[in-house]
Amino acid sequence: MNKPVSVDKNVQCRTPSKITRKLSRAKYPGGAIPATEHVLEVASLIPEDPDAVPGTPGVVLPVTEQDKTLATELPIWSNALAGQIVALSWNGERLLEDNQEDVTWHEVLASEAANPNFKFNLSVPVSYLTDIAPGTEQTVRLGYAVQQVGSDDWSNGPDRPVRIDKRAPGGSDGTLARLTFAEAIESRGYILLSDFVSGVLDCQVRGYVNQRQFDAIAVTITDGTDSSGPHPAKVISSGDATLVQLPLSAFDDLKDEVTITFTYVVTDRAGNESVVSNANNALKLLLKDVPGALDKAKVPKFGDEHTTPALLLDKHARAGVKVVIPEIKGLRRNDKIVALYNRLPSDEHTVPFPPPAGDLLEVTLLYTLTSRGPQNGPVDIDYQLWRAGVVIAETTVANVVNVDLRLPGGPDPDPDLPGHGNLKPAVIRGNASGQDDDLTVEDVQQGAKLTISWTDKGNTGLLEEGDALQLVWGDAVDGDNNFVNVFALDAVTKAEADAAMDITREVAPAWLETQPSGRVPMTVTITRAFNPDPDAENNPVFAPFKLVKVIRAKDLPGGGDDLDDLEFTRLNSKGSIDRTAAKNGVPIRIQLFDGAKETDSIQIHLSADDGMVDVPGAPIPEATKDLTSRTLSADEVRNGYITATIEEEWAYKVCLGTATVEYTATNLVGGKRSGHKRTFVAIRNPSDDSCPFPPVRSGSRKGR
């Protein structure tokens, strides 16, 4: 048959198609076939949405079909006649090449026209598909037209879009961004069970080049040895990030605490596949051996597990609050426990491994932590299990304790240190010496006065009428953290409160005697009745301890008894020291006191006056001298006495008078001076008025 021609007898259309194939395309005016009828069927096209309902017309030509002729089927139209011409159209151009009869166009046969169910099989040559360049995307309109017998006019049937996509999504190597997770996950570097919501972990793919709705994303996960995936996701927007949801089961075969690598590829609807994305290799897993909700902690004495729990007071908080962590399954070496006090974290505590049977460990909440919580009322105590620096489990039910940490002066600004950091230490002054914070033996025997500041360190009024006061003399405490050595002082009076001045209280000698000599820790407690219940216990506040120097008589050498007098062991018949007795040195003996030790020392004090034994005279300066102190030897301590010799020359300096030699015994506490026996010295000759010391004689001895 002859090829149909246009109404204007276009010369190009009469040119043999073997020479100018493309020039044989032409547009023909004509009528239209209703769009609802006789739709061109293209089996190779697929819908844009892979999840579209069955019967949704296809639009996209898959990559696998882009190098083949595009086959179509056209149901025969109503009132078809033999001799009518049907031709495919491509973007409005009818495909009428001579050599494409029965491929792109066809003349209806009588048998075909008589069959109402007949379908024409026409195809678009592959050359039309290959004309679309790689790396581009084009949507064409594929339709058909029918020419009536004996007419040059054409009636256009409905056309349909065909999207031919030859562009790979994502661009070139290195441009496809890595998979991203929630900021909390990225910052901590670990994926936890708690990151999964309803068994799913959310992450996202950011926008990429040539992104199109209905692209398919496939995520692969690997720990370097085992892999998981691909895990699919569908792109729902051409401009927004795409949500990817990874099931918990995706991580079943991957190891904890090793670097996990996440990558993905994108495949568009046509089947073009991207390069592999940049890797996210900054995360690790903590998904194995993870316990569920942890059992409630126990708080001995104060916890709600007790029928009548005790009120947690400031003294208890200062001593440290014990928290017992119960048994936990699935622990690993170097796991850590962090207790929470009112959601404030304690220090980390490494779990014992392997864990013991029963309770896991005991944690002590320090005052630096508890003092930062509520001052009064209920407080939640929880705990967390940490692994590799992140929380992997925690309690869901808290242990509730009731606290009362209210203090005169408010919360302690220096909870790390004993005593309230905003209170001024009291001052104690000896009644005998008048010295501040340095009590002598006489002060201990006569008592002292205590001065308590009315204001705190910020010069804000501290005391109030009715505040109970106690002297704490020594820092020992009992098992309930109560001070042991305390003495009640008179409470603050109304007159003192009206005056708002520093107040003083007498300190009895008996109180001072209760602590040994040395540096005694001292403070004053102030207790205010915050609780209206008269039976309720209130918190005493106390200033930081200060060390007061104290010397008790009973702690000095000899205890409370006087030391024995020094004895001269070589005297003449009259009990005096004459030239003969003094020759080669004057020997002495000191009986040691009870409890003498090798660390104790003795120092002899030479002195004399010009009087008689029973009538003291004026001191003799030349005969006054302190000898070098000497430490007791083991033999001396064992024997119970020491001996020594005073140089002979000293007796000549006394000349004619009375010796009053004493000594001081010193131990680690302090020194005590002995008394003396008056011993007459008669060196001067009757006719002389002085006692010149003779030249050194052979064998004479110096004092030692």
Image: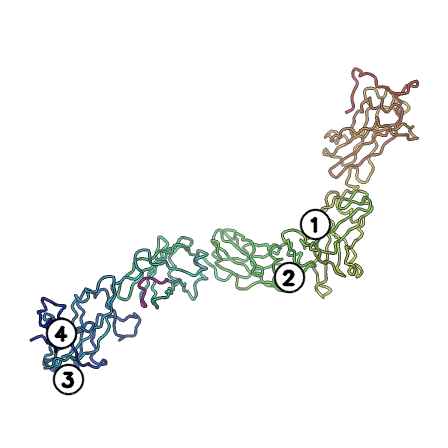
Q: Position of residue 290 (x, y in %)?
A: 46, 58
187 or 602, which lies in front? 187
Q: Calculate the distance from the C-alpha at mark 2 to the C-alpha at mark 4.
A: 93 Å
Q: Earlier in the sequence, mark 1 or mark 2?
A: 2
341 or 306, which lies in front? 341
> Which element is circle 1 on?
loop
Q: Quadrant of the N terminus?
A: bottom left
Q: Is residue 161 above or below residue 357?
A: below
Please report contact status of discs 3 and 1: CB closer than 8 Å, yes or no.
Answer: no
The residue under the point 79% across, 35% down is 593
Q: Would you name the residue on which mark 4 appears?
A: 105
Circle 3 or circle 1, nearest the eye: 3
> Which element is circle 2 on?
loop
Label 3 environment density (alpha carbons within 10 Å; few <14, some 14–19, many ≥20):
few
Q: Would you name the residue on which mark 1 appears?
A: 545
Query: What segment is highlighted magenta in the picture?
Result: 206-214
Q: Would you name the residue on which mark 3 appears?
A: 79
Label 1 environment density (alpha carbons within 10 Å; few <14, some 14–19, many ≥20):
many
Q: Calculate the distance from the C-alpha at mark 3 to the C-alpha at mark 4.
A: 19 Å
587 or 624, which lies in front? 624
> Which element is circle 4 on?
strand
Q: Would you name the residue on which mark 2 appears?
A: 375
